Structure formats: C-alpha cells, structure tokens
Image (cartoon, grey):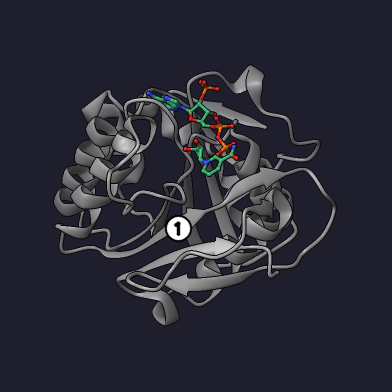
C-alpha cells in the first residue's frame, strides 16, 4: 500500500509504476472505504491494465485485503484543491459517496472540468425521480441534477436496496422507465460498475436504475 498526501504523489514510486502497463486506464475511487467500493476494488485490483487510486478520508477504513498496487490519497471530497489534484490525469472517476452529495457533486464536476477529465460514474439511489420526493432522497436527487447538468460523460446509477448476498444478478432500467425490484447485491452493483469502467463508451450520459430481476 502506498499512502500519499497529494503533495507527495512521487511516493507512487517508479517501482510501482513499472508494474503497470503504459496504456493502463487510470481510475480514481472517491469514497473508497465504502461498501460497494470494497467490491469494486476487489475486482479491479486483479486487472493489470487498471491503475487504481483510492481517495478516502482515512486509509484505516479500507477493508480490502490486497491493495498493494493501488495509490492511496487521504482526503475529503469537500476539499476542492485536494480533490482537483487527485483527479488530475485520471481517465475515470467513480464516486462511491454518502453525506453532502450535492456539494460533493459540484466539487467533482468543477474539478473534472478544470482537469479535462470526462468520465464519471456516480451512485445515487432508487426513488430520486419519485413525486413527491422523499426528504431522505433529496441529496441524491440534487447530486444527480448537478451531474446531469454538466458536460461530463456521466453514468448515474440508481440502485435499489443493498444486500450482502454473494451473487451477481441484475438488470437495469433507463431514466423515464419505471424502476423495478427492491434489492440488489453489492456484488452485482460492483460488477456493473467494473463493466462501465471496462467499456465507458457504452454508458455515456446514461442514468440507470439497477435491481435484481423479479
Ligand atoms: N444501503 C443501501 O441499501 C443503498 C441503496 C441505494 C443507494 N445507496 C447509496 O449508494 C452509495 C454507495 O453505498 P455504500 O454502501 O458503498 O456507501 P458507504 O459504505 O456509506 O460509503 C460512502 C463513503 O463516502 C465516504 N465519504 C463521505 N463523505 C466524504 C467526504 N466528504 N470525503 C470523502 N469521502 C466521504 C465515506 O467515507 P468515510 O469512511 O470517511 O465515512 C464512505 O466511505 C451511498 O450513497 C448509499 O447511500 C445505498
């Protein structure tokens, strides 16, 4: 594990860099200590062509066993300058965040715009287009509105409620279609996220509900 402050990114040593192919896709996970992020990290750390940066408030909260090839940045997404430096040079930003989502989305959109990074995957929630909108879901909806209003090549995900079941079984619905189902395994959602990371061009400016079929 390489723990870097943003001003010490050269700690991401030449030895580590030689392990990663020149053509590696650079992916940063914001909120890398989150539950779904854990599954995504487990999948992506097995891929040699992915250069992973884990951005999180405390590296101690990482739950993954093998993060030896990942670069780690401790930071808060609400700290704009830190976020901007972390996003610099990335190919894909995957936001696995909770809390002040609208403010975070604004920071992320601004930082990506300034750094010329186009692709973002942003997790929100089922129900954000319901009328009336549940007060619990407002922050997710407002964040989705911020992302949609940007010029980014976004994929917004609206998962149903999570389970810890060890299965991969999911379907997606498009924005405007009725959302289906009531649960989704974290592993399924993580699998979809890694598919988007593998083929981002297939999911440009998409806003997808995600659920377990039936
Ligand atoms: N649970 C469900 O059934 C369900 C259903 C639909 C959607 N969702 C939503 O899906 C998203 C992903 O879920 P999850 O279970 O993976 O979430 P999670 O475990 O709660 O992870 C969210 C992450 O956001 C990080 N975070 C919060 N504020 C931050 C900040 N200012 N700067 C940097 N990081 C910050 C947290 O880091 P710390 O470790 O530092 O706190 C945490 O790791 C969440 O928004 C969740 O609400 C959940």
Q: Residues within 10 Å of mark 1 (few under 14, many from 20)?
A: many
Counting labels gives: 1
Q: Position of residue 15 (x, y in %)?
A: 64, 46
Q: Position of residue 137 (x, y in %)?
A: 37, 37
* Mark 1 C-beta to ligand 1 under 8 Å: no
Question: Is 153 situated above or below 66?
Answer: below
Q: Nearer the viewer, residue 144 or 150?
A: 144
- Residue furthest bottom as drawn: 202
Question: What residue sits 19% from the left and 48% below the top?
Answer: 146
Q: Which residue is mark 1?
A: 157
Q: Nearer the viewer, residue 135 or 119?
A: 135
Question: Is 53 situated above or below 20?
Answer: above
Question: Is 166 situated above or below 181?
Answer: above
**Quadrant position of the C terminus in the picture:** bottom right
Question: Is 100 situated above or below 185?
Answer: above
Question: What residue sits 16% from the left and 44% below the top?
Answer: 110
- Mark 1 residue element: strand
Locate residue 162 relative to residue 201 in the image: left or right: right
Examine the rendering and report whether any part of residue 24 can be seen: no
Q: Nearer the viewer, residue 160 or 166?
A: 160
Locate residue 17 relative to residue 150 in the image: left or right: right
Locate residue 72 relative to residue 166 in the image: left or right: left
Q: Position of residue 174 (x, y in %)?
A: 41, 73
Corner quadrant of residue 129: bottom left
């Amino acid at each position: 594990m390489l723990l870097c402050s943003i001003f010490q990114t050269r700690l991401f040593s030449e030895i580590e860099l030689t392990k990663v192919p020149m053509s590696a896709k650079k992916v940063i996970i914001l909120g890398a200590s989150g539950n779904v992020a854990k599954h995504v990290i487990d999948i992506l750390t097995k891929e040699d062509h992915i250069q992973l940066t884990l951005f999180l408030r405390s590296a101690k909260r990482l739950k993954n066993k093998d993060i030896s090839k990942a670069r780690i940045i401790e930071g808060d997404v609400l700290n704009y300058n830190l976020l901007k430096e972390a996003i610099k040079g990335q190919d894909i930003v995957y936001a696995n965040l909770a809390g002040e989502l609208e403010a975070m989305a604004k920071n992320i959109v601004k930082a990506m715009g300034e750094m010329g990074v186009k692709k973002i995957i942003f997790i929100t929630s089922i129900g954000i287009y319901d009328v009336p909108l549940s007060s619990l879901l407002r922050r997710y909806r407002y964040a989705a509105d911020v992302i949609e209003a940007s010029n980014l090549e976004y994929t917004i995900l609206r998962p149903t409620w999570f389970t810890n079941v060890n299965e991969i079984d999911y379907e997606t619905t498009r924005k405007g279609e009725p959302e289906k189902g009531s649960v989704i395994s974290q592993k399924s959602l993580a699998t979809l996220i890694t598919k988007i990371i593998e083929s981002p061009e297939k999911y440009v400016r998409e806003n997808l509900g995600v659920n377990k079929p039936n």
